[in-house]
Amino acid sequence: MLPIMRDREARWYRHNDLLGDFPMIGFETWTCEDELLEPLQCRSEAAQLIELQIKREILNHEAVDDDRVVSPHFTVPWTLSMIPFNLKVESEHALDDKGHDVAYRFLHPIRDLRADLHKLQGSVYSVDRQGTLAWKALVEDIVGDILPVRMGMRSLVCCLSQYVVHLVGMETMMVSMMDYPEEVHALMKRLSQDYIAYFKWLEKEGLLFANNGNDWLCQGSFGFTRDLPRPGLAGRLIATHDVWGYMDSQESVGMSPDMFDEFFFPYYREVASLFGLLSYGCCEPVHTCWEKSLRRLPNLRKVSISPWCDETKMGEALRGSRTIYHRKPSPNFIGVGRDLDEEAFTRHICHTLECARGCRLEFSFRDVYTLEGNRDKPRRAVQLIRELIERHWK
């Protein structure tokens, strides 16, 4: 491992364990990698998958120079399936003239919650052990002599409101809370209990791995921490309380804090109690439900401060706390226009540095879908943030 990677790794551990004093910076490249990655050289589908995973590992170091650590191994996860209520939600997609998927809609299997509640069956889940191990063996045969291959996993993910919208649609979800409150609670209780049963099944079957190293945490972050696994691991299987979990509730942004607290939060809190540490939030403005609900999530280590969030309010709420101010800067500065507006970008970042003073701060750039042909913008943005941190953070 390069010395710079060892340094970044050490800083990530200190940051996630609330011991660091310097904000970390990550840039999620998969949404714009077509403008950053060189064309794949391999021909077969299997070889291309291996090549792509390796190139994605080193892309940030070569093209962005953020704080992402290049893994000294190739990770293979279990091939898992979890179908809530055994109801497959179909979707229709629209393609552009280049064959890229540009829009889609879900075909909701539930139209009226009270009339269709009987359609909810038991959730089903499975693991393809044979297929996963065969893939691992193939990867080892191809690259194992130069790159160790290991089994691993990302954070456990449970986004209850997302599946509810897939199942019934946004309008039905909102109206049902007024028309059929008991049925909404029944749906949320069954859904949360099924996810709990799924995660405990993963635990019982020995399908969980420690994700406290260079493991994807969702939302452009990583799991480096010495706070996991919990003490007493020797001689037992990895359990849910030994790993990171991730949750969000983007689909509930139209609800009042009272309605979120009544219809959604109790079920989120129950699932969250399984995890050793929790990272919460995506694009939703978490400040609206922070005081009434979200601050009570157990083991909450990171919370998303999205472009729609009241930064000042969340800075006040998180100052001196054990929850990291996980800032998502607006992607427009990098994704809109060929040139980076450095003056406006500087103001944007300085506002965050001021609001988050006294907090543990992390920057994660997400949802940048084009660089407008200027592949140097991500690197320059990261460079600017580091310069601003040096001038304004300490």
Image (spheres, grey):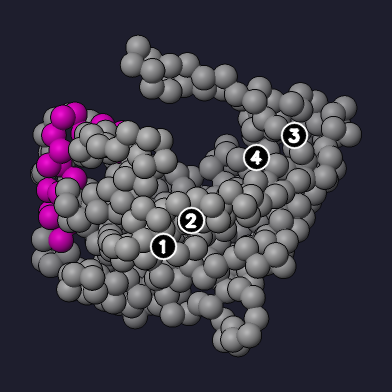
Q: Which portion, as a residue range, is magenta? A: 368-386
Which of the two marks, 3 or 1, is nearer to us in this view?
1
Q: Quadrant of residue 340?
A: top left
From the viewer's side, name the closer residue of 71 and 225: 71
Which of the two marks, 4 or 3, is nearer to us in this view?
3
Contact between marks 2 and 4 (CB within 8 A): the answer is no
Which of the two marks, 4 or 1, is nearer to us in this view?
1
Where does residue 197 sit, x and y in percent of width and height? 75, 58
Where does residue 302 sit, x and y in percent of width and height? 45, 63
Residue wearing tag 4: 163
Q: Quadrant of the C terminus?
A: bottom left
Where does residue 113 sit, x and y in percent of width and height? 81, 31
Q: Secondary structure at mark 4?
A: helix
Residue wearing tag 1: 149
Q: Is residue 376 magenta?
A: yes
Residue wearing tag 2: 136
